[in-house]
């Protein structure tokens, strides 16, 4: 009798989840002696669905209707070997002429998806794209240009900057363009 009131109030509750409402309706129709085919017709659910919720209510009661069974993941988890291999490769230089490992490059090398690589990197705090490396230029005038650019930036830091209206009026501090690398 108490279960019947709880089931009826669940059906009438406008804030209840719809899946809970139709499950309660299946149980109430079953308690009234309605046949399975008629319950299928009234609720729009399959026979196996009706049987499943009738059985669940008999085994677990009212609370059994309010929770869903957990299911295993569709995708099996990656093995520890794959995870360790990704971490080891990330700490090494990439095989091609690249500055760092990308997710796609690592995924192709190991044979997993890009999202799996990113998930492993995130879990272990690895950010190979943030490794800062200094590469020297092949330009023969590189040292000269580097000195000139550092000199010009030190001059500019000491000189005051002018507002836009003063620039329009041709009040410029520098008469020549700065000798920056081009």
Image (cartoon, helix red, strand yellow):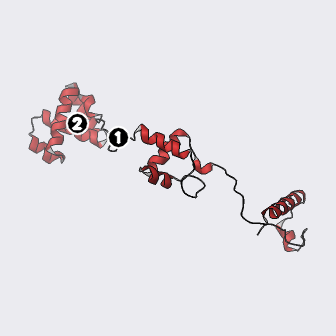
| 32 up-or-down from 177: above or below | above
Q: Give the number of callouts.
A: 2
Indicate the quadrant where residue 8 lies: top left
Q: Position of residue 68 (x, y in %)?
A: 29, 36
Circle 2 packing at 10 Å, graded few (<14), some (14-19), many (20+), is many
Residue at x 55%, y 57% (from the top left corner)? 96
Q: In the image shown, does 41 or 175 lie closer to the viewer? A: 175
Earlier sequence position, callout 2 versus callout 1: 1
| 56 up-or-down from 86: above or below | above
Q: Position of residue 109 (x, y in %)?
A: 46, 52
Residues at marks 2 and 1, CA–CA distance in whole angstroms? 14 Å
User: Which callout, 2 or 1, points to the residue nearer the camera?
Assistant: 2
| 174 up-or-down from 28: above or below | below
Q: Which mark is residue 23?
A: none
| 163 up-or-down from 48: above or below | below
Q: Position of residue 75 (x, y in %)?
A: 34, 44
Indicate the quadrant where residue 71 lies: top left
State if disc 1 and disc 2 touch (CB < 8 Å): no
Residue located beneath label 2 in the image: 24
Secondary structure at numbered mark 1? loop
Indicate the quadrant where residue 66 lies: top left
Residue 27: tell me if it is visible: no
Q: Position of residue 76 (x, y in %)?
A: 34, 42
Q: In the image shown, does 35 or 85 lie closer to the viewer? A: 85
Q: Quadrant of the C terminus?
A: bottom right
Residue located beneath label 1 in the image: 15
Residue at x 25%, y 29% (from the top left corner)? 62
Residue at x 47%, y 47% (from the top left corner)? 117
Circle 1 packing at 10 Å, graded few (<14), some (14-19), many (20+), is few
Secondary structure at numbered mark 2? helix
């Amino acid at each position: 009798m108490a279960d019947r009131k709880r089931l009826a109030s669940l059906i009438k509750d406008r804030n209840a989840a719809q899946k809970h409402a139709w499950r309660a309706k299946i149980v109430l129709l079953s308690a009234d002696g309605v046949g399975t085919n008629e319950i299928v017709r009234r609720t729009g659910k399959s026979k196996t669905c009706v049987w499943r919720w009738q059985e669940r209510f008999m085994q677990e009661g009212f609370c059994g209707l309010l929770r869903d069974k957990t299911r295993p993941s569709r995708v099996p988890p990656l093995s520890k070997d794959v995870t360790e291999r990704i971490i080891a490769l990330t700490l090494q230089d990439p095989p091609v002429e690249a500055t760092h490992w990308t997710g796609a490059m690592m995924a192709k090398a190991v044979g997993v998806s890009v999202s799996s690589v990113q998930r492993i990197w995130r879990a272990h705090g690895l950010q190979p794209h943030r490794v800062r490396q200094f590469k020297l230029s092949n330009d023969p005038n590189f040292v000269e240009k580097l000195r000139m650019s550092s000199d010009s930036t030190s001059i500019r830091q000491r000189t005051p900057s002018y507002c836009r209206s003063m620039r329009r009026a041709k009040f410029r501090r520098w008469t020549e363009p700065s000798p920056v690398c081009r």
